[in-house]
Amino acid sequence: MTQLDWHQDAPGLDDLVMLDRDPADDEIDQVAVRGYRLGRVRSEMERYGVDACLLFDSVNMRYATGTRNMQVFSSRNPARYLFVPLDGPVVLFEFTGCEHLSADLETIDEIRPATTASFVAAGDAIAGRERLWAREIAELIRTHCGPTATVGIERVNAGAAMALAGEGFTIVDAQQPVERARAIKSDEELKCVRSSLRATEIAVGRLRDAIRPGLTEQQLWSVLHQAVIAQGGDYVETRLLNSGERTNPWFQETSGRVIQPNELIALDTDVVGCHGYYSDFSRTFHAGPDEPTSAQRELYRLAHEQVHHNMAIIRPGVSFKEYSDRAWDIPARFEAHRYYLSAHGTGMTGEYPYLYHHRDYEHAGYDGVFEPNMTICVESFIGADDGGEGVKLEQHCLVTETGLEVLSTFPFEDALLAP
């Protein structure tokens, strides 16, 4: 059996690897998606007493209106931002020369050039630029929200925030209403989630098919990127593909290390994919050509057991505290290297809520309730604290009216699940 044959041996994997993207995956009413999301933001603003939100986070801007431009660049440069009042016009302040990109979005009422209040843009005159920016925004807020408005902001430099507070407004963090808004998906929005997952599964199938000793981690990881971008996805948010002993502990970034025969290869997708939606599942593979060892199979079976035990707990009305109390008990030898979360929300990125292990709940956890149309990723990492390889598995799921639906359909490894 050749290397390539071994990696095409899983039932149904040939079809997955060779599958072209289904055009039906993109039959989505994007106007309805955008309208729902903007409505969710405003509903949560009203709930928390926020008169206007000023959004700099490019993912939050995209969630609220659908506007998309240089999402990675904008994550560290305050060069575009969005004004969302509780009532009144939504105004996009766009990067210089890019005003045309969002001109057709029905969620945006006006597009203006942005004033970039950053040291890179203003140099030692940054304080003056921040005051100018604050005066421009203050005029807009007073016009549509009044002189004593409560304004939610996020991800703006401290000087700009202080300058805006100096205009007489109450400044609060916009994360609370926006994260709460993002947590509940519409049925049309869930089509975007499924579309992104299907494309990422195709990409992971191609990565799996490419596995062979002699490739570097980076060369193998690049297969995922190529397939994601070719299908209309955006980017991969982290660098989490590792091989051999670099699989344990987790969170070792992809490197130039050469993959050796019969090692484990662990992947967390973390793909910001089609329609801007996160596709987040994890799989661990075996490099071949021999069968996995009993030690490798034990790690895999434990990770598989943890994920499925914890998925079985989740249903509407279950509290986060109850979930934590009932979650899978991690064996002592794997506790130190446990994944930092038991599960987490997901949407356009990882998002609210975070679900913590029982042993971490007292100092890190918070309570809440699982609700229908939350999308939740259930996590496991199993690696001994004294070294050796590790296994990363994760499923991307939907909380339904009656329980949990698994959205990530990429198969697990039969050879690693074998007794």
Image (cartoon, rainbow, N blue to C red):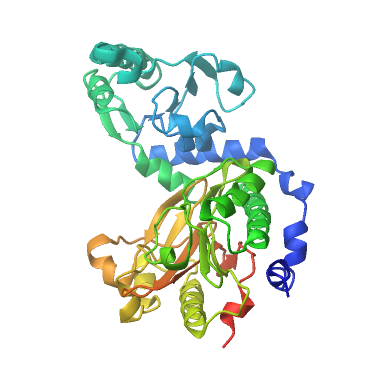
Residue at (65, 57) in percent of width and height: 201
- Image quadrant occupied by the C terminus: bottom right
Residue at (49, 60) in percent of width and height: 376
Residue nearest the viewer, comparing 361 with 270: 270
Residue 54 lies, in percent from the top left, at: 39, 28
Residue nearest the viewer, comparing 365 with 144: 365
State whether residue 100 appears in this view. yes
Counting the numbered discs, the total is 0
- Which quadrant of the structure image shows residue 162? top left
Residue 281 lies, in percent from the top left, at: 54, 60
Relative to 40, is 91 above or below?
A: above
Residue 367 lies, in percent from the top left, at: 32, 62
Relative to 24, is 142 above or below?
A: above
Q: Is residue 2 left or right of residue 216?
A: right
Residue at (39, 25) in percent of width and height: 78
Relative to 353, is 104 above or below?
A: above
Relative to 296, is 16 above or below?
A: above
Residue farthest to the bottom, as pictured = 419
Residue nearest the viewer, comparing 129 with 200: 200
Q: Is residue 169 left or right of residue 372?
A: left
